[in-house]
Amino acid sequence: MTDEIKGLKGFYDRYPEDWASWRKLIDTVENTAKEFGFREINAPSVEKADLYRVKSGEELMDQMYNFEDKGGREISLIPEQTPTRARLVQQRKDLKSPIKWFDTSKRWRYENVQRGRDREFFQTDFDVFGVDSVEADAEVIAAGATIYKKLDLDDRVNFLVNDRNLLESILEAHGIEKTEEAMKVIDDKEKMSSEEFLEELTDVGLGGDQAEQVDEITSISGQINEQISQLREQAPEDAQEAVDRMEALSETLEAYGVAEMVELDLSIVRGLAYYTGLVFEAFDSEGELRALFGGGRYDDLVGLFGGQDVPAVGFAFGYSTTIELLKKEDRWPLKEVETEVYVLTVSDSVKDKGMEYAKDLREKGLTVETDLSSRGFGSQLEYADSINAKRVLIVGERDLENDEVTIKHMDSGDEENIGKDEVVGKLTE
């Protein structure tokens, strides 16, 4: 006899009472994607490991689930879907721009399990391929912000945006040559005190005055339209076009009705090196949680996987972190598991009639359950209560002889008799 087999750390069993809320959240995200015109794709859960070496090198490989299949190929459970999407775009030269895709699926990374970070996790990717316009940048941010509006979390979530190229130009204009080293430190600025930040910058080769300049520059933040003049002062002549683009982004977000949720923050650089311009992260505005998710523009990535260069911008929505935020707001669970109608048949003689009612109600889109265990009247009522049935349709022989049935409303306990031919109309009104 073996010990009880338990699930793996960082992987979760979600029973119906848990999954109902997950499903509602996923539906909210996916419905938003569809409303913005993104089309759903379905992609593999495994890829050749080399797909990730091309993009990220060996560093990411250490965090992945890699194994050799029976054909001797090194393959990986996907840790993210961006390389897969790049591969899909390269394989189809007939796709018309803009290509707007979304997909919800599981991803896997072998890392330390902590609040909001699991080893198996869901993400929904939103991506726009084929256009490098500021309108595309604004649309992906607006889609993300709209999700939080639907969840009534727009007062609790801020999108912090930056342009990596713009920041790099500003740093160079201030005489800072080791921009790559500085950007890696800037990426972790939110996790450090001012003293620690300055120390880290000097550790990577910046002088004391330069470190203080970087601290001052990356402290620029606030509503985009209120920071444009300061950006213009800081940016060199050859970076003014990037400032114009940031200003246009602010105006476009205003048209989408989400500008109040978006701020400029020059300390946002995102750790992934493939971002080529715009970067953004969604944050808990009260600072209790780490970044909810992030994204940006990655115009050079698709070209790594084939012959055509395709500009792209997108993000991957993070579920675990968003659920943590919903819990903070006492908004989780989002939905209870429920059955709209339970058909209670008093005796075997009326089971066929009960099944007929169930079929007709299901055809109208209702969730309907029936007795599968030959329970008695009281046991069926108890079961109906246990599955959170909203109404019970009681079908009895005597009632049918009187051309009627009974509806019991489980929340109030009230009962009403209706004509046996009025059931579908009454329960679907």
Image: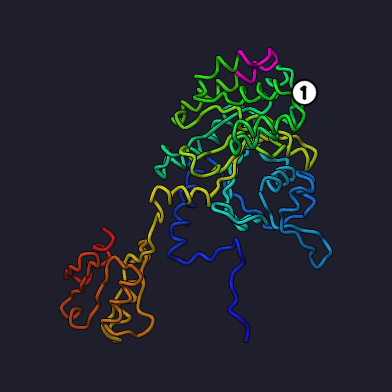
Judge by depth and name the residue closer to the eye, 387 or 286.
286
Amino acid type, callout 1: Glu
Q: Quadrant of residue 73?
A: bottom right
For the stretch drawn in magenta, what is the main secondary structure? helix
What segment is highlighted magenta in the picture? Answer: 233-243
Residue 178 falls within the magenta-colored stretch? no
How far across and how far down the image is residue 237, in percent? 68, 12
Number of marks in picture = 1
Left or right relative to 240: residue 407:
left
Judge by depth and name the residue closer to the eye, 136 or 254.
254
Q: Secondary structure at mark 1?
A: loop
Q: Residue at x 70, y 17 (%)?
A: 174
Q: Residue at x 31, y 73 (%)?
A: 384
Q: Is residue 346 above or below residue 86?
A: below
Q: Residue at x 41, y 37 (%)?
A: 155
Q: Quadrant of residue 242?
A: top right
Q: Is residue 274 visible?
A: yes
Q: Residue at x 76, y 52 (%)?
A: 61
**Residue carrying label 1:** 177
How far across and how far down the image is residue 232, in percent? 60, 14
Q: Residue furthest right?
A: 72
Q: Is residue 97 visible?
A: no
What crowding class fits label 1: few (fewer than 14 Cα within 10 Å), some (14-19), or many (20 or more)?
Answer: some
Left or right relative to 426: residue 277:
right
Judge by depth and name the residue closer to the eye, 300 or 260.
260
Judge by depth and name the residue closer to the eye, 183 or 374.
183
Q: Is residue 345 above or below residue 84?
A: below
How far across and how far down the image is residue 210, in percent? 70, 22
Q: Quadrant of residue 349?
A: bottom left
